Image: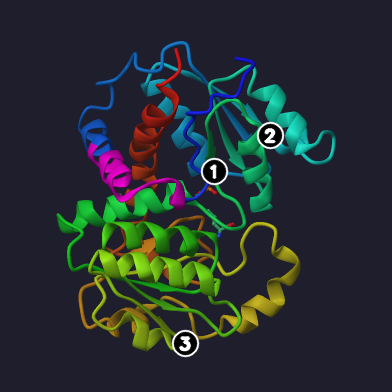
Amino acid sequence: MNRRDMTKKDIITIRDLSTEEILELMRVARKLKKSPFARAKALRNKTLALLFQKPSNRTRVSFEVGMAHLGGYTLYLSPQEIDMGGRETVKDVACVISRYVDGIVVRVFAHQDAVIFARYSAVPVINGLSDFAHPCQALSDVFTIREKFGSLKKRRIAFIGDGNNVLNSLLMTCARTGVSLNIATPRGYEPEREVFEEAAGIAKKHRAVFNFFNDPHEAVKGCDAVYTDVWISMGQENVREQRLKDFEGFQVNETLMRATGKDALIMHCLPAHRGEEITDIIDGKNSIVYDQAENRMHVEKAVLLKTLRKRG
Ligand code: CP
Ligand code: NVA
């Protein structure tokens, strides 16, 4: 393929998906979870490149195994191998790799690199995490919430911690699917105002309400699940000490879970840092973190079918 396919479907943020598309992805994912090999030839002769600037367990393994289930191949390109932005420009890497393969998952530091990459790639690009977004994670999270509660209606989730990539994508996915969110972050770590306001506006149309708190105990009251993520994301290691101080009081622990007033579930995208953002409560009976991780694969298979199948 040497021309850009103008109908290609990139998923760089959840904004690239309508509510109908998200619900359809979830329907397909549910079927695939029941029958993992039902579409064993759907992506025969297709190759997916995984171009990663950061380490990964879930994203890499779930895409690789998912692609194998659908009859396709994957090619893992490590940070050292390609050195995007160092050895070559983002544009050159995108233009070249997209002539070889049928789809590309990128994991980048700067979100803008994912945007530029998608602009120049001739084939669909899926964001496998940037400093701004983690759309595949959020799709899997909402899929898992539905799986646990049987429906998304009238569910309220609390997100406690950093207003980061995971929260940004969760905000938009919950908004589009009508899941209410209570958010608590320390001052200075709120999600960007425009992101929050856009998502809250969409949520309203779907009868969901988004609330912001600075006190985590207030935020979790009445919530069905409590979600957290690391305080120090990949690439932020140099500000570790400052962040540990700033996030004091935002740990998900037994006291905070009691403040829900419910038998609430515990969510985390993983990897987790026990003793920092969460205690070993993550290993208890209310934790659904391994379901979230497993569901990455089922949902991503649906994403691959949607994005990669079009081309001949
Ligand atoms: N949750 C998640 O994306 O995990 P990895 O960083 O291991 O891929
Ligand atoms: N916020 C975390 C998510 C890891 C899946 C990070 O960016 O490192």
- Which one is in front, 116 or 267? 116
Of the pair 28 and 284, the residue shown nearer to us: 28
Give the residue displayed 50% in from the left and 72% down from the top: 277
Majority secondary structure of the magenta segment?
helix
Give residue 178's quadrant in the image: bottom left
Residue 225 visible at all: no
Mark 1 / mark 3, whichever is N-terminal: 1
Q: Is residue 23 magenta?
A: yes
Amino acid type assigned to the residue bearing label 1 in the image? Asn
* Mark in the foreground, 2 or 3: 3
Q: Are marks 2 and 1 in contact (CB under 8 Å)?
A: no
Whichever of labels 2 and 3 marks the residue nearer the N terminus, that label is 2
Mark-to-mark CA distance, 1 and 3? 30 Å
Mark 2 to mark 3: distance in Å? 39 Å
Residue lying furthest left:
150
Q: Pointer 2 and pointer 3: residues touching (CB < 8 Å)?
A: no
Quarter that holds the N terminus: top right
Q: Amino acid at mark 3?
A: Asn
- Residue 202 vertical placement versus 251 (above, below): above
Which residues are the magenta region? Answer: 14-27
Residue 127: which numbered mark, if any? 1
Q: Residues within 10 Å of mark 3 (few under 14, many from 20)?
A: some
Seen at 35% across and 54% down, the residue is 141
Q: Within the magenta stretch, is there residue 132?
A: no
Q: Position of residue 288 (x, y in %)?
A: 31, 57
Image disc number at residue 78: 2
Question: Is 297 drawn above or below residue 282 in the view shown?
Answer: above
Type of the residue with mark 2: Ser
**Residue placed under numbered mark 3 in the picture:** 214
